[in-house]
Image: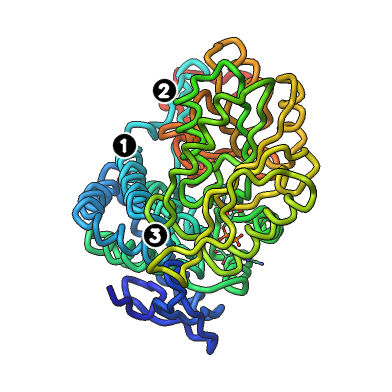
Amino acid sequence: MIFNEVKNFVNGEFRPGSSNKIHHVISPLDGKELTTFTESTYEDLEEIIYFAQTAQREWQKVTLKERVQVLYKYKQLLEENKDELTEIIYRENGKIHSEAKAEIDKAIELTEFACALPQFVNGENMEVSRGVYCSSTRNPIGIVASIVPFNFPSMVPHWTIVNAIALGNAFILKPSEAVPISSQYIAKLLKEAGLPDGLFNVINGTQSTVENLCDHPGIKAITFVGSTKVAKIVYQRASHNLKQVLALGGAKNHIILLPDAHPDMASSNIVASMSGCAGQRCMAAATLIAVGNCDTILNKLIGDAQKIQCGTSLGAVISKAAKKRIEGYITEAEQQGAKIILDGRNTVVPGKENGFYVGPTIIDNATADMRVAKEEIFGPVLTIIRVNTIDEALAIENANPYGNACSVFTQSGGLANYVTENASAGMCGVNIGVPVPREPFGFGGWNESRFGSGDITGKSSIVFFTKEKKTTTKWNPEAGNNWMS
Ligand code: NAD
Protein backbone atom coordinates (compact mmCIF):
# COMPACT_ATOMS: atom_id res chain seq x y z
CA MET A 1 0.00 0.00 0.00
CA ILE A 2 1.49 3.34 -1.07
CA PHE A 3 0.18 6.50 0.55
CA ASN A 4 -0.09 9.87 -1.21
CA GLU A 5 0.96 13.04 0.54
CA VAL A 6 -1.54 13.78 3.32
CA LYS A 7 -3.53 16.94 2.61
CA ASN A 8 -6.13 19.17 4.16
CA PHE A 9 -9.71 18.61 3.05
CA VAL A 10 -11.32 21.93 2.22
CA ASN A 11 -14.74 22.40 0.65
CA GLY A 12 -14.67 18.85 -0.71
CA GLU A 13 -11.13 19.04 -2.15
CA PHE A 14 -7.72 17.87 -0.97
CA ARG A 15 -5.17 20.70 -0.70
CA PRO A 16 -1.76 20.76 1.00
CA GLY A 17 -1.17 23.00 4.01
CA SER A 18 0.59 26.18 2.93
CA SER A 19 3.38 26.64 5.48
CA ASN A 20 6.89 25.49 4.64
CA LYS A 21 7.07 22.98 7.50
CA ILE A 22 7.01 19.36 6.35
CA HIS A 23 6.17 16.52 8.77
CA HIS A 24 7.15 12.89 8.22
CA VAL A 25 4.73 10.10 9.09
CA ILE A 26 6.60 7.02 10.32
CA SER A 27 5.18 3.50 10.52
CA PRO A 28 5.70 1.93 13.98
CA LEU A 29 5.88 -1.46 12.24
CA ASP A 30 9.31 -0.87 10.70
CA GLY A 31 10.34 2.73 11.37
CA LYS A 32 9.99 3.63 7.69
CA GLU A 33 8.40 6.78 6.32
CA LEU A 34 4.85 6.25 5.06
CA THR A 35 4.15 9.74 3.79
CA THR A 36 4.47 13.44 4.61
CA PHE A 37 2.22 16.42 5.21
CA THR A 38 2.67 20.16 5.46
CA GLU A 39 1.74 22.13 8.59
CA SER A 40 -1.28 24.35 8.03
CA THR A 41 -1.40 28.11 8.53
CA TYR A 42 -4.01 30.48 9.96
CA GLU A 43 -4.90 31.41 6.37
CA ASP A 44 -5.58 27.72 5.60
CA LEU A 45 -7.98 27.67 8.53
CA GLU A 46 -9.65 30.92 7.41
CA GLU A 47 -10.36 29.32 4.05
CA ILE A 48 -11.91 26.25 5.69
CA ILE A 49 -14.04 28.44 7.94
CA TYR A 50 -15.28 30.50 4.99
CA PHE A 51 -16.57 27.44 3.12
CA ALA A 52 -17.77 25.70 6.28
CA GLN A 53 -19.90 28.71 7.27
CA THR A 54 -21.54 28.83 3.86
CA ALA A 55 -22.22 25.08 3.85
CA GLN A 56 -23.48 25.01 7.44
CA ARG A 57 -26.03 27.78 6.83
CA GLU A 58 -27.71 25.52 4.25
CA TRP A 59 -27.22 22.29 6.23
CA GLN A 60 -29.07 23.64 9.27
CA LYS A 61 -32.16 24.10 7.08
CA VAL A 62 -32.19 20.36 6.28
CA THR A 63 -34.23 18.28 8.72
CA LEU A 64 -32.47 15.88 11.03
CA LYS A 65 -34.23 12.94 9.44
CA GLU A 66 -32.92 13.99 6.03
CA ARG A 67 -29.41 14.76 7.29
CA VAL A 68 -28.91 11.27 8.65
CA GLN A 69 -29.70 9.74 5.26
CA VAL A 70 -26.12 10.63 4.25
CA LEU A 71 -24.89 8.73 7.30
CA TYR A 72 -26.85 5.60 6.40
CA LYS A 73 -24.95 5.62 3.12
CA TYR A 74 -21.68 6.40 4.91
CA LYS A 75 -22.17 3.44 7.25
CA GLN A 76 -22.60 1.20 4.21
CA LEU A 77 -19.35 2.59 2.73
CA LEU A 78 -17.49 1.93 5.99
CA GLU A 79 -18.66 -1.67 5.79
CA GLU A 80 -17.69 -2.04 2.12
CA ASN A 81 -14.24 -0.50 2.69
CA LYS A 82 -13.51 -2.19 6.01
CA ASP A 83 -10.48 -4.15 4.80
CA GLU A 84 -8.73 -1.13 3.31
CA LEU A 85 -9.52 1.08 6.31
CA THR A 86 -8.23 -1.63 8.63
CA GLU A 87 -4.98 -1.92 6.70
CA ILE A 88 -4.40 1.84 6.90
CA ILE A 89 -4.78 1.83 10.70
CA TYR A 90 -2.45 -1.16 10.93
CA ARG A 91 0.22 0.63 8.91
CA GLU A 92 0.04 4.06 10.48
CA ASN A 93 -0.65 3.09 14.11
CA GLY A 94 1.03 -0.30 14.40
CA LYS A 95 -1.80 -2.07 16.21
CA ILE A 96 -2.63 -5.61 15.10
CA HIS A 97 -5.22 -6.24 12.37
CA SER A 98 -8.00 -7.44 14.67
CA GLU A 99 -7.66 -4.27 16.78
CA ALA A 100 -7.59 -2.08 13.69
CA LYS A 101 -10.72 -3.81 12.38
CA ALA A 102 -12.41 -3.30 15.75
CA GLU A 103 -11.90 0.45 15.28
CA ILE A 104 -13.89 0.34 12.06
CA ASP A 105 -16.56 -1.82 13.70
CA LYS A 106 -16.82 0.82 16.41
CA ALA A 107 -16.92 3.62 13.82
CA ILE A 108 -19.86 1.78 12.26
CA GLU A 109 -21.61 1.49 15.63
CA LEU A 110 -21.08 5.21 16.26
CA THR A 111 -22.54 5.97 12.85
CA GLU A 112 -25.54 3.77 13.65
CA PHE A 113 -26.13 5.84 16.77
CA ALA A 114 -25.91 9.05 14.72
CA CYS A 115 -28.47 7.58 12.29
CA ALA A 116 -30.76 6.97 15.29
CA LEU A 117 -30.53 10.58 16.54
CA PRO A 118 -33.99 11.46 15.16
CA GLN A 119 -35.37 9.03 17.74
CA PHE A 120 -33.58 10.86 20.57
CA VAL A 121 -33.77 14.53 19.56
CA ASN A 122 -37.50 15.17 19.76
CA GLY A 123 -37.75 18.35 21.80
CA GLU A 124 -40.42 19.05 24.40
CA ASN A 125 -43.76 20.80 24.49
CA MET A 126 -45.87 21.65 27.53
CA GLU A 127 -48.85 23.82 28.41
CA VAL A 128 -47.18 26.00 31.04
CA SER A 129 -50.15 28.34 31.74
CA ARG A 130 -53.72 27.94 30.49
CA GLY A 131 -53.50 28.31 26.67
CA VAL A 132 -49.74 29.07 26.79
CA TYR A 133 -47.33 26.51 25.40
CA CYS A 134 -43.61 26.30 25.89
CA SER A 135 -41.60 24.16 23.49
CA SER A 136 -37.90 23.46 23.16
CA THR A 137 -35.88 22.57 20.10
CA ARG A 138 -32.23 21.61 19.62
CA ASN A 139 -30.35 23.76 17.10
CA PRO A 140 -26.88 23.37 15.56
CA ILE A 141 -24.04 25.39 17.07
CA GLY A 142 -22.30 26.20 13.78
CA ILE A 143 -18.72 25.10 13.15
CA VAL A 144 -17.19 22.63 15.58
CA ALA A 145 -13.64 21.23 15.66
CA SER A 146 -12.19 18.03 17.10
CA ILE A 147 -8.52 17.57 17.98
CA VAL A 148 -7.66 13.89 18.32
CA PRO A 149 -4.82 11.64 19.57
CA PHE A 150 -2.74 8.96 17.84
CA ASN A 151 -4.07 5.84 19.53
CA PHE A 152 -7.36 5.50 17.63
CA PRO A 153 -6.90 7.08 14.17
CA SER A 154 -10.49 6.27 13.16
CA MET A 155 -12.59 5.47 16.24
CA VAL A 156 -11.91 8.65 18.23
CA PRO A 157 -12.63 10.95 15.24
CA HIS A 158 -15.93 9.06 14.80
CA TRP A 159 -16.85 9.80 18.42
CA THR A 160 -17.68 13.32 17.24
CA ILE A 161 -17.78 13.56 13.43
CA VAL A 162 -21.04 11.71 12.83
CA ASN A 163 -23.07 13.16 15.71
CA ALA A 164 -21.88 16.72 15.09
CA ILE A 165 -22.74 16.53 11.40
CA ALA A 166 -26.10 14.79 11.98
CA LEU A 167 -27.00 17.56 14.44
CA GLY A 168 -26.53 20.17 11.72
CA ASN A 169 -22.99 21.45 12.29
CA ALA A 170 -19.98 21.83 10.02
CA PHE A 171 -16.95 19.94 11.27
CA ILE A 172 -13.17 20.39 11.26
CA LEU A 173 -10.94 17.44 12.18
CA LYS A 174 -7.35 17.96 13.35
CA PRO A 175 -5.82 14.47 13.17
CA SER A 176 -2.81 13.42 15.20
CA GLU A 177 0.38 14.19 13.27
CA ALA A 178 1.49 10.61 13.98
CA VAL A 179 -1.51 9.01 12.22
CA PRO A 180 -3.07 11.45 9.74
CA ILE A 181 -3.78 8.96 6.92
CA SER A 182 -7.12 7.54 8.09
CA SER A 183 -8.65 11.04 7.97
CA GLN A 184 -8.07 11.16 4.21
CA TYR A 185 -10.27 8.11 3.71
CA ILE A 186 -12.92 9.38 6.12
CA ALA A 187 -13.12 12.55 3.98
CA LYS A 188 -13.29 10.57 0.75
CA LEU A 189 -16.06 8.28 2.00
CA LEU A 190 -18.17 11.09 3.49
CA LYS A 191 -18.04 12.87 0.13
CA GLU A 192 -18.94 9.65 -1.66
CA ALA A 193 -21.88 9.22 0.73
CA GLY A 194 -23.24 12.55 -0.52
CA LEU A 195 -22.26 14.91 2.29
CA PRO A 196 -22.31 18.44 0.81
CA ASP A 197 -18.89 20.07 0.40
CA GLY A 198 -17.69 22.26 3.25
CA LEU A 199 -19.37 20.28 6.03
CA PHE A 200 -16.48 17.93 6.77
CA ASN A 201 -12.98 19.37 6.72
CA VAL A 202 -9.52 18.23 7.73
CA ILE A 203 -6.71 20.51 8.87
CA ASN A 204 -3.29 18.95 9.41
CA GLY A 205 -0.70 20.21 11.80
CA THR A 206 0.68 20.26 15.30
CA GLN A 207 0.71 22.75 18.17
CA SER A 208 0.37 25.92 16.06
CA THR A 209 -2.60 24.49 14.15
CA VAL A 210 -4.31 23.55 17.43
CA GLU A 211 -3.69 27.06 18.74
CA ASN A 212 -5.27 28.52 15.60
CA LEU A 213 -8.35 26.33 16.16
CA CYS A 214 -8.59 27.51 19.77
CA ASP A 215 -8.30 31.15 18.70
CA HIS A 216 -10.46 31.40 15.58
CA PRO A 217 -13.76 33.14 16.38
CA GLY A 218 -15.57 31.21 13.64
CA ILE A 219 -15.34 27.97 15.65
CA LYS A 220 -18.04 27.70 18.29
CA ALA A 221 -17.15 24.45 20.05
CA ILE A 222 -14.05 22.30 20.42
CA THR A 223 -13.58 18.75 21.57
CA PHE A 224 -10.14 17.52 22.47
CA VAL A 225 -8.96 13.99 23.20
CA GLY A 226 -5.34 13.41 24.21
CA SER A 227 -2.97 13.80 27.14
CA THR A 228 -3.99 15.69 30.27
CA LYS A 229 -1.15 18.16 29.76
CA VAL A 230 -2.50 19.27 26.39
CA ALA A 231 -6.17 18.86 27.43
CA LYS A 232 -5.58 21.56 30.04
CA ILE A 233 -3.88 23.86 27.52
CA VAL A 234 -6.69 23.45 24.96
CA TYR A 235 -9.45 23.74 27.57
CA GLN A 236 -8.01 26.94 28.99
CA ARG A 237 -7.16 28.57 25.67
CA ALA A 238 -10.43 27.76 23.89
CA SER A 239 -12.57 28.61 26.95
CA HIS A 240 -10.68 31.90 27.28
CA ASN A 241 -11.82 32.57 23.71
CA LEU A 242 -15.40 31.88 24.89
CA LYS A 243 -15.85 28.58 23.07
CA GLN A 244 -17.69 25.62 24.43
CA VAL A 245 -15.02 23.01 25.23
CA LEU A 246 -14.89 19.38 26.25
CA ALA A 247 -11.35 18.09 26.70
CA LEU A 248 -10.65 14.46 27.58
CA GLY A 249 -7.23 13.74 29.01
CA GLY A 250 -5.03 10.86 30.05
CA ALA A 251 -5.69 8.03 32.47
CA LYS A 252 -4.30 5.61 35.01
CA ASN A 253 -6.93 2.93 35.37
CA HIS A 254 -7.18 0.67 38.39
CA ILE A 255 -8.22 -2.93 38.64
CA ILE A 256 -9.28 -3.99 42.12
CA LEU A 257 -8.85 -7.76 42.30
CA LEU A 258 -10.56 -9.69 45.08
CA PRO A 259 -9.58 -13.29 45.98
CA ASP A 260 -13.04 -14.68 45.10
CA ALA A 261 -12.84 -13.52 41.46
CA HIS A 262 -13.36 -16.15 38.77
CA PRO A 263 -9.72 -16.97 37.84
CA ASP A 264 -10.18 -17.53 34.09
CA MET A 265 -12.52 -14.61 33.62
CA ALA A 266 -10.36 -12.23 35.66
CA SER A 267 -7.14 -13.33 34.01
CA SER A 268 -8.32 -13.17 30.40
CA ASN A 269 -10.06 -9.81 30.86
CA ILE A 270 -7.19 -8.16 32.70
CA VAL A 271 -4.52 -9.42 30.30
CA ALA A 272 -6.56 -8.26 27.29
CA SER A 273 -7.03 -4.87 28.92
CA MET A 274 -3.37 -4.24 29.78
CA SER A 275 -2.00 -5.49 26.45
CA GLY A 276 -4.70 -4.55 23.92
CA CYS A 277 -3.54 -1.85 21.49
CA ALA A 278 -0.13 -2.33 23.18
CA GLY A 279 -1.51 -0.67 26.30
CA GLN A 280 -2.08 2.55 24.36
CA ARG A 281 -5.70 2.94 25.41
CA CYS A 282 -7.09 5.47 27.81
CA MET A 283 -9.17 2.57 29.21
CA ALA A 284 -6.27 0.13 29.61
CA ALA A 285 -5.74 -1.69 32.91
CA ALA A 286 -2.63 -0.05 34.36
CA THR A 287 -2.46 -0.62 38.13
CA LEU A 288 -3.80 -3.83 39.61
CA ILE A 289 -4.48 -3.71 43.33
CA ALA A 290 -4.64 -7.24 44.70
CA VAL A 291 -6.63 -7.39 47.92
CA GLY A 292 -5.53 -10.25 50.22
CA ASN A 293 -4.20 -13.47 48.76
CA CYS A 294 -4.94 -13.45 45.01
CA ASP A 295 -1.95 -15.65 44.06
CA THR A 296 -3.93 -18.31 42.18
CA ILE A 297 -5.47 -15.67 39.91
CA LEU A 298 -2.22 -13.74 39.54
CA ASN A 299 -0.31 -16.89 38.56
CA LYS A 300 -2.94 -17.61 35.91
CA LEU A 301 -2.71 -14.02 34.73
CA ILE A 302 1.09 -14.16 34.42
CA GLY A 303 0.79 -17.42 32.47
CA ASP A 304 -1.75 -15.87 30.09
CA ALA A 305 0.39 -12.77 29.58
CA GLN A 306 3.43 -14.95 28.80
CA LYS A 307 1.54 -16.47 25.87
CA ILE A 308 1.21 -13.10 24.11
CA GLN A 309 3.28 -12.98 20.93
CA CYS A 310 4.76 -9.61 20.05
CA GLY A 311 4.01 -8.73 16.44
CA THR A 312 1.16 -11.27 16.27
CA SER A 313 -1.10 -10.77 19.26
CA LEU A 314 0.54 -7.55 20.46
CA GLY A 315 1.12 -4.55 18.23
CA ALA A 316 3.84 -1.93 18.18
CA VAL A 317 3.93 1.25 20.24
CA ILE A 318 3.68 4.47 18.31
CA SER A 319 7.30 5.66 18.20
CA LYS A 320 10.88 5.03 19.17
CA ALA A 321 10.48 7.73 21.85
CA ALA A 322 7.41 5.94 23.28
CA LYS A 323 9.36 2.65 23.46
CA LYS A 324 12.20 4.41 25.28
CA ARG A 325 9.77 6.11 27.70
CA ILE A 326 7.96 2.86 28.54
CA GLU A 327 11.20 0.93 29.05
CA GLY A 328 12.49 3.76 31.24
CA TYR A 329 9.49 3.37 33.56
CA ILE A 330 10.19 -0.38 33.90
CA THR A 331 13.87 0.17 34.67
CA GLU A 332 13.07 2.82 37.25
CA ALA A 333 10.61 0.48 39.05
CA GLU A 334 13.24 -2.27 39.07
CA GLN A 335 15.80 0.13 40.58
CA GLN A 336 13.27 1.12 43.25
CA GLY A 337 12.83 -2.50 44.34
CA ALA A 338 9.74 -3.66 42.45
CA LYS A 339 9.89 -7.13 40.92
CA ILE A 340 9.75 -7.44 37.13
CA ILE A 341 7.82 -10.70 36.72
CA LEU A 342 7.48 -10.41 32.97
CA ASP A 343 9.91 -8.12 31.15
CA GLY A 344 9.00 -6.59 27.77
CA ARG A 345 12.14 -4.47 27.44
CA ASN A 346 14.46 -4.93 24.46
CA THR A 347 11.86 -6.90 22.53
CA VAL A 348 12.79 -7.58 18.92
CA VAL A 349 10.25 -9.13 16.58
CA PRO A 350 11.86 -11.37 13.93
CA GLY A 351 11.29 -9.84 10.52
CA LYS A 352 10.28 -6.53 12.12
CA GLU A 353 13.61 -5.68 13.75
CA ASN A 354 13.15 -1.93 13.28
CA GLY A 355 9.59 -1.89 14.65
CA PHE A 356 8.80 -0.21 17.95
CA TYR A 357 7.82 -3.18 20.10
CA VAL A 358 7.57 -3.55 23.86
CA GLY A 359 6.59 -6.96 25.17
CA PRO A 360 3.94 -7.52 27.84
CA THR A 361 5.32 -6.48 31.20
CA ILE A 362 4.15 -7.30 34.71
CA ILE A 363 5.66 -5.48 37.67
CA ASP A 364 4.89 -6.93 41.11
CA ASN A 365 5.38 -5.63 44.65
CA ALA A 366 5.16 -2.02 43.60
CA THR A 367 4.24 0.65 46.11
CA ALA A 368 1.65 3.33 45.55
CA ASP A 369 4.23 6.11 45.50
CA MET A 370 6.27 4.65 42.60
CA ARG A 371 5.83 6.41 39.24
CA VAL A 372 4.88 3.12 37.55
CA ALA A 373 1.96 2.84 39.97
CA LYS A 374 0.61 6.35 39.59
CA GLU A 375 1.64 7.88 36.24
CA GLU A 376 0.27 7.07 32.80
CA ILE A 377 2.82 4.81 31.06
CA PHE A 378 0.74 4.15 27.91
CA GLY A 379 2.35 0.83 27.10
CA PRO A 380 1.64 -2.89 27.77
CA VAL A 381 2.66 -2.68 31.42
CA LEU A 382 0.65 -3.86 34.43
CA THR A 383 1.81 -2.75 37.86
CA ILE A 384 0.69 -4.82 40.85
CA ILE A 385 0.29 -3.40 44.35
CA ARG A 386 -0.69 -5.75 47.17
CA VAL A 387 -2.92 -4.57 50.02
CA ASN A 388 -4.97 -6.18 52.81
CA THR A 389 -8.35 -4.46 52.52
CA ILE A 390 -10.75 -3.07 49.93
CA ASP A 391 -10.60 0.30 51.65
CA GLU A 392 -6.82 0.43 51.22
CA ALA A 393 -7.33 -0.35 47.51
CA LEU A 394 -9.98 2.35 47.17
CA ALA A 395 -7.79 4.87 48.96
CA ILE A 396 -5.04 4.31 46.36
CA GLU A 397 -7.53 4.55 43.51
CA ASN A 398 -9.17 7.68 44.94
CA ALA A 399 -5.83 9.42 45.46
CA ASN A 400 -4.87 9.16 41.80
CA PRO A 401 -5.38 12.45 39.94
CA TYR A 402 -6.93 10.74 36.91
CA GLY A 403 -10.39 9.19 36.92
CA ASN A 404 -11.21 7.46 33.65
CA ALA A 405 -11.90 3.82 34.54
CA CYS A 406 -11.89 1.46 37.51
CA SER A 407 -12.88 -2.22 37.41
CA VAL A 408 -13.45 -4.69 40.18
CA PHE A 409 -13.11 -8.46 39.77
CA THR A 410 -15.17 -10.50 42.23
CA GLN A 411 -18.12 -12.89 42.37
CA SER A 412 -19.70 -10.97 45.24
CA GLY A 413 -22.38 -8.48 44.16
CA GLY A 414 -22.17 -6.58 47.43
CA LEU A 415 -18.41 -6.09 47.24
CA ALA A 416 -18.64 -5.11 43.57
CA ASN A 417 -21.23 -2.47 44.43
CA TYR A 418 -19.05 -1.18 47.27
CA VAL A 419 -16.15 -0.67 44.86
CA THR A 420 -18.14 0.91 42.01
CA GLU A 421 -19.94 3.24 44.44
CA ASN A 422 -16.69 4.42 46.02
CA ALA A 423 -14.30 4.52 43.06
CA SER A 424 -13.39 7.98 41.81
CA ALA A 425 -13.78 7.21 38.11
CA GLY A 426 -16.32 8.09 35.46
CA MET A 427 -16.43 4.61 33.93
CA CYS A 428 -16.58 1.61 36.24
CA GLY A 429 -16.60 -2.09 35.45
CA VAL A 430 -17.50 -5.32 37.19
CA ASN A 431 -15.55 -8.29 35.80
CA ILE A 432 -14.80 -6.24 32.67
CA GLY A 433 -11.27 -5.17 31.76
CA VAL A 434 -12.22 -2.31 29.44
CA PRO A 435 -15.48 -0.85 30.80
CA VAL A 436 -16.32 1.35 27.83
CA PRO A 437 -19.95 2.46 27.97
CA ARG A 438 -21.59 1.84 24.59
CA GLU A 439 -24.18 4.08 22.97
CA PRO A 440 -26.57 5.51 24.02
CA PHE A 441 -24.40 5.78 27.17
CA GLY A 442 -21.70 8.42 26.96
CA PHE A 443 -17.91 8.12 27.16
CA GLY A 444 -16.16 10.33 29.69
CA GLY A 445 -14.05 10.16 32.82
CA TRP A 446 -13.73 12.24 35.96
CA ASN A 447 -11.05 14.38 37.60
CA GLU A 448 -7.98 15.04 35.39
CA SER A 449 -9.30 12.69 32.72
CA ARG A 450 -11.92 15.21 31.62
CA PHE A 451 -12.29 18.99 31.58
CA GLY A 452 -15.72 20.39 30.78
CA SER A 453 -19.11 18.91 31.44
CA GLY A 454 -20.93 15.96 29.89
CA ASP A 455 -19.60 13.07 27.88
CA ILE A 456 -18.25 13.05 24.35
CA THR A 457 -20.50 10.34 22.89
CA GLY A 458 -24.01 8.99 23.30
CA LYS A 459 -26.89 11.13 24.48
CA SER A 460 -24.53 13.68 26.04
CA SER A 461 -23.28 14.64 22.59
CA ILE A 462 -26.76 15.94 21.75
CA VAL A 463 -26.36 18.55 24.46
CA PHE A 464 -22.79 19.38 23.47
CA PHE A 465 -23.35 19.76 19.73
CA THR A 466 -26.57 21.75 19.90
CA LYS A 467 -27.98 24.83 21.60
CA GLU A 468 -31.49 24.68 22.98
CA LYS A 469 -34.16 27.19 21.98
CA LYS A 470 -37.31 27.64 24.06
CA THR A 471 -40.37 29.16 22.39
CA THR A 472 -43.43 30.23 24.36
CA THR A 473 -46.65 30.53 22.34
CA LYS A 474 -50.19 31.80 22.93
CA TRP A 475 -52.78 31.73 20.13
CA ASN A 476 -56.04 31.89 21.99
CA PRO A 477 -57.07 35.51 22.94
CA GLU A 478 -59.32 34.05 25.64
CA ALA A 479 -56.33 32.51 27.36
CA GLY A 480 -55.96 35.79 29.22
CA ASN A 481 -52.96 37.12 31.06
CA ASN A 482 -51.76 35.80 34.35
CA TRP A 483 -48.90 36.86 36.61
CA MET A 484 -46.37 35.23 34.28
CA SER A 485 -47.64 36.45 30.93
P1 NAD B 1 -1.27 14.42 22.83
O1 NAD B 1 -1.92 15.19 23.91
O2 NAD B 1 0.19 14.47 22.70
O3 NAD B 1 -1.85 14.90 21.40
C1 NAD B 1 -3.23 15.02 21.17
C2 NAD B 1 -3.46 16.11 20.14
O4 NAD B 1 -2.98 17.35 20.65
C3 NAD B 1 -2.74 15.86 18.82
O5 NAD B 1 -3.62 16.14 17.76
C4 NAD B 1 -1.57 16.83 18.87
O6 NAD B 1 -1.22 17.32 17.60
C5 NAD B 1 -2.06 17.95 19.75
N1 NAD B 1 -0.99 18.57 20.54
C6 NAD B 1 0.12 17.96 21.06
N2 NAD B 1 0.83 18.84 21.78
C7 NAD B 1 0.18 20.02 21.74
C8 NAD B 1 0.41 21.31 22.31
N3 NAD B 1 1.47 21.57 23.07
N4 NAD B 1 -0.50 22.30 22.07
C9 NAD B 1 -1.58 22.05 21.32
N5 NAD B 1 -1.85 20.85 20.74
C10 NAD B 1 -0.99 19.85 20.95
O7 NAD B 1 -1.80 12.91 22.97
P2 NAD B 1 -1.34 11.63 22.14
O8 NAD B 1 0.03 11.25 22.55
O9 NAD B 1 -1.64 11.80 20.69
O10 NAD B 1 -2.39 10.54 22.71
C11 NAD B 1 -2.20 9.82 23.88
C12 NAD B 1 -2.95 10.44 25.04
O11 NAD B 1 -4.33 10.55 24.73
C13 NAD B 1 -2.89 9.59 26.30
O12 NAD B 1 -2.65 10.43 27.39
C14 NAD B 1 -4.27 8.96 26.38
O13 NAD B 1 -4.70 8.61 27.67
C15 NAD B 1 -5.10 10.07 25.82
N6 NAD B 1 -6.39 9.59 25.36
C16 NAD B 1 -7.47 9.89 26.13
C17 NAD B 1 -8.73 9.43 25.77
C18 NAD B 1 -9.92 9.73 26.62
O14 NAD B 1 -11.01 9.46 26.18
N7 NAD B 1 -9.77 10.27 27.81
C19 NAD B 1 -8.87 8.68 24.60
C20 NAD B 1 -7.75 8.41 23.82
C21 NAD B 1 -6.50 8.88 24.21
- Identify the residue at horizontal 44%, vertical 37% (top origin): 458
Q: Is residue 188 left or right of residue 125?
A: left
Residues 105 and 212: in front is 105
Q: CA distance from mark 3 to mark 1?
A: 23 Å
Q: Earlier in the sequence, mark 1 or mark 2?
A: 1
Per the image, the residue denoted by label 2 is 476
Indicate which label's residue lies in the foreground, 3 or 1: 1
Amino acid type indicated by mark 2: Asn
- In terms of image quadrants, where is residue 351? bottom left
Residues 344 and 243: in front is 344
Query: What secondary structure is marked by label 1?
Result: loop
Per the image, the residue denoted by label 3 is 57
Ligand 1 resides in the quarter of the picture at bottom right
Q: Earlier in the sequence, mark 3 or mark 2?
A: 3
Residue 80 visible in this rendered orientation of the protein: yes
- Identify the residue at horizontal 41%, vertical 68% (top origin): 352
Q: How is the image coloured?
A: rainbow
